[in-house]
Image (tube, rainbow, N blue to C red):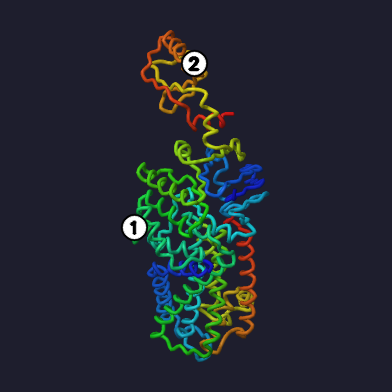
Amino acid sequence: MTVAIQIEGVSKRFGALQALQDIHLDIAEGEFFGLLGPNGAGKTTLISILAGLVRADSGKARIMGHDVREAYREARRALGVVPQELVFDPFFSVRETLQIQSGYFGMRNNGDWIDEIMLHLDLTSKANANMRSLSGGMKRRVLVAQALVHKPPVIVLDEPTAGVDVELRQGLWQFIRRLNQDGHTIVLTTHYLEEAESLCQRIAMVKQGRIVALDSTANLLKRVHHHLNLRLRTDRPMPAQLVAAAHNEASGGAVLRLHDYSDLEPTLARIREAGCVIQELELVQPDLEDVFVQLMNQ
Amino acid sequence: MTGFPTLLHKEVLRFWKVGFQTIAAPVMTALLYLLVFAHVMEGRVRVFDGVPYSAFLAPGLVMMAVLQNAFANSSSSLIQSKITGNIIFVLLPPLAYWEFFAAYVLAAMVRGMVVGLGVLAVVFPFVDLPVQHPLWVLAFAFAGSAILGALGVLAGIWAEKIDQLAAFSNFVIVPLTFLAGVFYSTRSLTPFWQGVSHLNPFFYMIDGFRFGFFDKSDIDPAISMGFIVICLAVVTGLTLAILRNGYKLRH
């Protein structure tokens, strides 16, 4: 296995905050890898260390075997980063932005590849438009194009679909999937766990600067597949012992965890006995979100 | 190939695209200074023997424009990039810290020179300006704009808000240039204020630059150049050390 990203004992502290603590992680070449965790868990700090934007207090990070500090030129050439913030340079058009980014990596006459990326990201019609005039979604596409302009073997996407409409999100994933099929290593952080579930082969879950789970997506799902989720809404509060075991949803409903189908009838009976009328009911298989919630609550 | 030529090109393009604001406006300001001050002061102030006041003033205004615009270019570019977040585009590529420094400083020098040439062009019809030592003129313009370009990098990295940068510009750069003998010869000052003026590095830049035109100066230009080279070395060394360390850029 060739290692695309190697992180050995990386720690980072910002004042009183221990942002990362002794992180060890290897990501193989060609992998589609997910980095998940709540806000402030340390995902962006870890990505920033790989990109050379943040310097680790201790430990080593390598991209395609190149140390991000000692061999920073080679490491940065091998890495394309799509930052989380929607940033752009208001002085330039889309094509100029991509030509300039390409030049920063020492690549001149990169027009053919720039045209190809713009075509795949549906940016061709906006090639000569000033960055200021683009919508948020279009600016996001330009950020993706900027990360790809020097043909890096490793691509890191930090929340690339935050605030992006469904159509663009799907188009973007199709494109990233193809890059992965072409051999690019992809590292993704996202808040949309269903995206991570469908795209990533392996996932690391990060909490308070530590990796709390690192496994294939399939294995992570096995951790919760031994139960069922009963999602329901009632006209009045449910019995106390059920409320205690329920996980409340933002929509106002609640999710009850059942061991198996035989649990269903007794649960419904208890709700009925309490005089509650069920207004909505759904029985669902647990997903990555359940793994996430379970790990984060531990 | 490294990214240095592209960063330099982009920095030049950045001010060129808004040339009205970055080139035409300071040229206009300098012309207004010349017209107003020459009208008010001509014949009232003695400067160099045989040099009319308006002619004396012109090189001072040119150099002031060179210095202030060199500083404005690197400092405003950096603070804007930091505030908007697009500084990340130059931090992600494989650029060495000294390439980053060289690109921002050279672009600042280009802006300073372009504005300086613009001021020279518009004041030329109004004053009789000899150029006795063109090499001194160029040497002082290059060294002065390099120092201010580097100071602009330093200030742009240090400042976290436009307000802080404006304070640095309005309370340090502008007073030092105004009080450096742009509008008067320091020989007209009392010995105490002459001594104070000679602590101001900008004085040597303007005095030396003016020597290139008139073969006359308050201080021997070789001494001024020596002092400026030392200043350039100090500011360059400090800025490079800060960039290497990643201060406020790479946390």
Q: From mark 1 to mark 2, how far is it between C-alphas?
A: 56 Å
Determine whether, in the image, residue A46 is placed left or right of residue A249: right
Where residue A134 sits: x, y (%)? 35, 54
Residue B174 appearing in the image: no
Determine whether, in the image, residue A122 is placed left or right of residue B103: left
Judge whether A261 appears above or below A123 on screen.
above
Circle 2 — which element?
Answer: helix
Residue B42 appearing in the image: yes
Residue at point 62%, 46% (across, down): A14
Residue at point 47%, 44% (across, down): A159
Disc 1 with disc 2 on a shared chain: yes
Question: Which amino acid type is shown beneath numbered disc 1?
Answer: Thr
Mark 1 or mark 2, earlier in chain: 1
For label 2, the residue is A242
Circle 1 — which element?
Answer: helix
Where residue A298 sits: x, y (%)? 59, 29
What chain does badge 1 belong to? A
For label 1, the residue is A124
Where residue A239 sits: x, y (%)? 47, 13
- Report which quarter residue B13 is drawn in: bottom left
A52 or B60, which lies in front? Answer: A52
Q: Residue furthest top?
A: A273
Determine whether, in the image, residue B19 is placed left or right of residue B152: left
Question: Which amino acid type is shown beneath numbered disc 2?
Answer: Leu
- In the picture, the disc for residue B139 is none
Judge whether A240 appears above or below A106 on screen.
above
* Label 2 packing within 10 angstroms: few (<14), some (14-19), many (20+): some
Residue at point 49%, 21% (across, down): A257
